[in-house]
Image (tube, coloured by chain):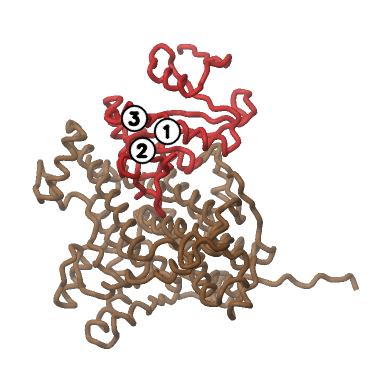
Chain colours: A brown, B red
Amino acid sequence: MENVRSSTLPKKFHDAVVRWGQTFLPDYQLLLDNWEKFFPHDRRHELCAYRQMGMCDELECGTMKGKPKFGRAAEMTPELADHLLKAVKAQASTELGSIQQHQLTLARAPEEVDQFWVLRMMAEELRHGYQMFHVLLEDDWASVGDTKGEDMVEEILQMRTGSHVLGAFNVDFDSFVDNIVFCALIDRVGKYQLAMQKVSAYKPMAESMPPMLQEEAFHLATGVVPIRRWVQSAAKEEGYVGMDHLQKVFNKWFPRGLDMFGDERGGGSNVKMGLKPMNNAEAAKQYTEEVQQLVSDLNLRYLRARFPKLSRDEAQERLKRIVEKGDTVEGVGPDNLLRLPHNSFFRRRGIYAYQMIDVDGKPIETLDGFKSHLKSVLPEAYATARDMTKFHELMGKVVHGEVKAEDAVHILPNLSRVGGVCPCSRAVRWVIDEPAKSNGH
Amino acid sequence: MAKAKNAGGAAAKAPKGEIALRPVNELDIEAVCAIDEKLSGQDRPGEWERRISYYIRRDPELSLVALEGKKVVGFMLGEVRAGEFGLEEPAGWIEVLGVDPACQGRSVGRKLLEGMLEGFKARGAKAVRTLVNETGQKELFGFFEAGGFEPTPIRTLERKV
């Protein structure tokens, strides 16, 4: 990478991240041992923070556009610092949270190559978490609030699936299909957040983004390429993953991806303060267009693999006929292809949060009807997962008027874990002060 | 040189009537397949999945696509390498390019080449190389010649096996 400065965290924090990695990313060494086999000539992974030098010095959006960016926390208003710290915390939480999720089903990868690509992606997510810790620890936040960087790092390291900041990172993976679809859909939201934060009014945050974005590009390919292969295999009735299952996994993750952008009515403060260039609705709209393109490409790929004699133009024409007119041609109809669930389906944030709406955007009258619909359109393993049990409980309270939908959006799944004291238990601190050195007396 | 703009990247589009450039991404695979199919007559999704993901993995900002509006109308893939074949200096290598036949004659290839040269230079490359069959790919040879490329004493050696 050109014009990039690398550095490491102070030892006790670096060691804490390494210990965290040993617990939640136990195959890290396996990745390094096999690096040359799967990633020949690529720069070896390193646990460190990178900062892109030579970036814009002036605020790129908002009411202070054109003024110098903030290099230190003390230069910012408490309100701006508060917004920024929330974003850093959420970012760090997502990076570490995704590792905990991927680890659950990593070993079930049908292909070794896909497994190592996901493993590399996990290692890079660990580096991204490390990067956010670097942002927190390199500055003194005392002048803008009660937050200490050290405490935030410990708090984030303590988070588990169920206690992360954003809903998408509180959902367990059920199969390796989750690993891959998550990369294609949820990492794509990550790309948007990183790209938007590249203009951040806080220079260290802005400088952290380009190296992270470079790695994120690989994460998206880690998702999209296997899905393309699976779709082609499904068309030939070969392989491991059918279109119906893929559709259900898309239904599981796409709503969580949209939730990650936040309430469609919000995001304006971040734009005004120069932290992001787009509000939530604009970013979510662009994201939806991208995922729609992915779905469309996958469907075209399905038709071409299923009917190899069709030309590209003929396949595109047929795709249009099936998707837009609902026709079934040579045994392939809309139900055999993928489609994007409606943006109001199964939402937990924003204007559609906790509304009973089906995948096509049509309202469902009864709670039982909604439950039954979710069961039919989500993967079976997920429909019976704890996250869903908690969701149904909360949904019931919203429907019966015990909880308002706008309050429900703030209630975390809180999936408390069963288990005793282990290195990842909340009873253990990750950041440990080094014992005082003996002076020899 | 026009650069496609947007925060997320893939949804970028060129201003009306202009050809813009942006780094290649995983959602371009199908568009690149389409251009390749027009040029070669073959549908080779596996090949482009492999190649594009390789370049994204290696350096996602370097390899480029050309856009007309939101449509991908050309691509150029390459990377910087050093220390191969006894050539110690970092050099840019252009591996493959393609331009939609419907857009040929609109300087799409030249714009891609200029964008790639800029990227190679920023990465410390001292020279940029490619391999072209002088007799079998006359048009391509002419394209690179017009772009300032010259034959070098480095020769490709080949033996049938």
Pinpoint residue A248: horizontal percent, then vertical percent.
25, 58
Image vertical order of residue B145 relative to residue B49, above or below: above
State if disc 3 and disc 2 touch (CB < 8 Å).
yes
Q: What amino acid type is highlighted by mark number 3?
A: Arg
Which is more N-terminal, label 3 or label 2? 2
- Residue A22 at least partly seen: no
Please, which chain is the residue tagged with disc 1 on?
B
Q: Is mark 3 on a helix, strand or loop?
A: loop
The residue labelled by disc 1 is: B111
Estimate how packed mark 2 is, as few (under 14), some (14 to 19) or many (20 or more) residues with alpha carbons within 10 Å.
many
Sequence-first disc among 1 and 3: 3
What residue appears at the point 55 percent right and 43 percent down from the top-left corner? A35
The residue at 30%/47% (across/down) is A240
The dot on residue B106 is 3
- Nearest to the observer: residue A71 or residue A385: A71
Residue, far right: A441
Question: Would residue A209 appear left or right of A349 to someone viewing this image?
Answer: right
Q: In which quarter of the image is the C terminus of chain A?
A: bottom right
Q: Distance of mark 2 from mark 3, alpha carbons?
A: 9 Å
